[in-house]
């Protein structure tokens, strides 16, 4: 047992891609390629390492460093020379190749022809940025040689937008690889990894975002406050440093985008308030920053879900860990560095209940979307929320046949995520009132309560943290 948690679906997909490599495929071209993308520090490389260990095949695993084309070419040649490929020693007899065309051609000559092998190019966006000819060289070698060999080519990248573009029309590698996304560890994975009950596992998920590096330093069985008390004493804790490293890598030059991201992280959700909190940026700058942030999947732009069109777009941080980091950790790093992490912990305690009540909403909606076939009425194909400009009403859960403009509302619900308060008759009365104000709903539209601490209101179905956790198992 090596302690590897979760990733059953991702490992299964990689096994499925390896199957035709092993059998030779139906077309006589057994070679396959996968473009594997995911947020930084989400565990992509660790996933591939686990896959390689389980597969037990000859392989080479090269990670680009992004310094220069020459540096990465030399590193690639050195990595192949010490790999488990049967003819890897051939690379030791050559000087470092000067082009990727030459390097990849040499690689093809080192691959076995009578048994499967795996080639991994990690941090591939660095190679694309360093050398505009890299994509063309990769496409040529794949078409002429690699696709004819029993090899699985795994191309890994953290720049999500660039990795998506690599497989789009007009790019050299178009339709040659299978897209695969590696998400953070799920709440169920967090519960299994830390040995926590469901409610506490959701707290840990909201703080860690499911990032393995943070969860690795979280003591088994420790609740949120035990972990935070420990992490906030150490300026080098993964909880502190991962956020700044992520932002530095994602936005090396886009200062305005980081400012806008910070404004959203501090709780601003509308275009006007975001611009004001970002120092009074002009509307054009805010628009460009929001487009960049949504393209890179850092920010989600959402519309109210109902049968009536709406322009009341709201923005939220899409990454659970960054939501927490931007709200509490980033502003508190100077205090931690002065040895006053206790002040940051006090600030988190003061705001935790309100912050968690908002942060849990997208997690609950994702769980409901996963549970839709079992727990929601038929035709619940979209899950969202509803609000007006004045937030009267503001409804946590809307299920409908489609989004953002539905033909039919199938369910509305409320989230009550408090430690010591159940969903009671007053909450039910408020939800019934809100239902009467929702376009497309009527007295027959089903109701749902999602509650951390039980439901005492009669006649309304409810879901607990244990029910929600089952969405990922």
Image: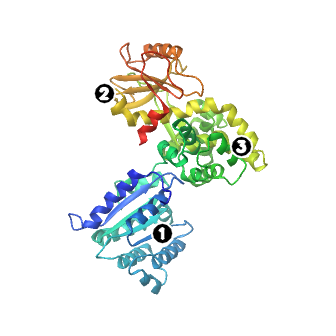
In terms of image quadrants, where is residue 355? top right
**Mark pair 3, 2: CA separation:** 46 Å
Residue picked out by circle 2: 378
Q: Is residue 444 above or below residue 282?
A: above
Instruction: Judge by depth and name the residue closer to the eye, 121 or 240.
Output: 240
Q: Are marks 3 and 1 in contact (CB under 8 Å)?
A: no
**Mark pair 2, 1: CA separation:** 48 Å
Q: Earlier in the sequence, mark 3 or mark 1?
A: 1
Residue picked out by circle 1: 62
2 or 1: mark nearer the eye: 2
Q: Are there few (<14), some (14-19), or many (20+) residues within 10 Å of tag 1?
A: many
Q: Earlier in the sequence, mark 2 or mark 1?
A: 1
Measuring 41% from the left and 31% from the top, which residue is drawn there?
383
56 sits to left or right of 296: left
Residue picked out by circle 3: 332
Measuring 29% from the left and 72% from the top, which residue is drawn there?
149
Instruction: Judge by depth and name the residue closer to the eye, 380 or 255.
Output: 380
**What secondary structure is marked by label 1?**
strand
Image quadrant where one finds the C terminus:
top left
| Image spot of residue 379 (x, y percent) | 31, 28
| Image spot of residue 409 (x, y percent) | 36, 22
Note whether residue 271 is visible. Answer: no
Task: Kindly give the residue lying farthest to the bottom in the view shown.
Answer: 93
């Amino acid at each position: 047992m090596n302690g590897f948690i979760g990733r059953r679906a991702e490992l299964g997909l990689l096994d499925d891609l390896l199957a035709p490599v092993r059998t030779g495929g139906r077309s006589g071209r057994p070679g396959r390629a996968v473009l594997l993308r995911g947020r930084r520090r989400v565990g992509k490389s660790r996933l591939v390492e686990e896959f390689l260990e389980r597969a037990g095949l000859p392989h080479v695993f090269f990670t680009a460093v992004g310094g220069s084309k020459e540096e990465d070419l030399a590193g690639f040649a050195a990595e192949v020379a010490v790999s488990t490929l049967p003819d890897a020693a051939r690379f030791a007899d050559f000087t470092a190749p000067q082009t990727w065309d030459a390097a990849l051609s040499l690689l093809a000559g080192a691959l076995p022809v009578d048994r499967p092998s795996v080639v991994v190019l990690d941090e591939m966006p660095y190679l694309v940025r360093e050398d505009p000819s890299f994509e063309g060289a990769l496409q040529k070698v794949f078409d002429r040689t690699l696709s004819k060999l029993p090899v699985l080519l795994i191309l890994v990248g953290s720049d999500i937008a660039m990795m998506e573009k690599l497989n789009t029309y007009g790019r050299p590698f178009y339709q040659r690889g299978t897209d695969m996304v590696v998400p953070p560890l799920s709440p169920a994975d967090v519960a299994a990894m830390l040995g926590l009950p469901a409610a506490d596992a959701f707290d840990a998920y909201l703080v860690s975002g499911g990032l393995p590096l943070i969860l690795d330093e979280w003591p088994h069985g420790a609740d949120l406050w035990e972990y935070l008390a420990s992490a906030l004493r150490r300026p080098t804790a993964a909880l502190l440093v991962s956020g700044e490293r992520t932002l530095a890598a994602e936005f090396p030059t886009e200062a305005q985008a980081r400012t806008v991201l910070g404004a959203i992280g501090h709780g601003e959700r509308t275009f006007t308030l975001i611009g004001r909190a970002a120092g009074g940026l002009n509307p054009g700058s805010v628009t460009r920053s929001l487009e960049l942030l949504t393209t890179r999947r850092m920010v989600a732009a959402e519309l109210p879900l109902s049968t009536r069109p709406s322009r009341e777009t709201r923005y939220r941080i899409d990454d659970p860990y960054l939501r927490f980091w931007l709200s509490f950790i980033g502003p508190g790093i100077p205090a931690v560095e002065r040895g006053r992490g206790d002040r940051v912990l006090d600030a988190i305690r003061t705001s935790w209940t309100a912050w968690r009540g908002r942060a849990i909403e997208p997690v609950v909606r994702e769980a409901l979307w996963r549970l839709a076939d079992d727990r929601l009425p038929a035709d619940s194909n979209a899950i969202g929320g509803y609000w007006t400009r004045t937030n009267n009403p503001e409804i946590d859960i809307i299920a409908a046949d489609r989004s953002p403009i539905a033909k039919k509302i199938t369910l509305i619900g409320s989230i009550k995520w408090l430690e010591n308060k159940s969903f009671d008759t007053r909450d039910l009365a408020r939800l019934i009132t809100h239902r009467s104000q929702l376009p497309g709903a009527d007295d027959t539209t089903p109701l749902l309560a999602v509650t951390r601490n039980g439901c005492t209101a009669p006649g309304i179905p409810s879901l607990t943290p244990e029910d929600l956790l089952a969405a990922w198992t």
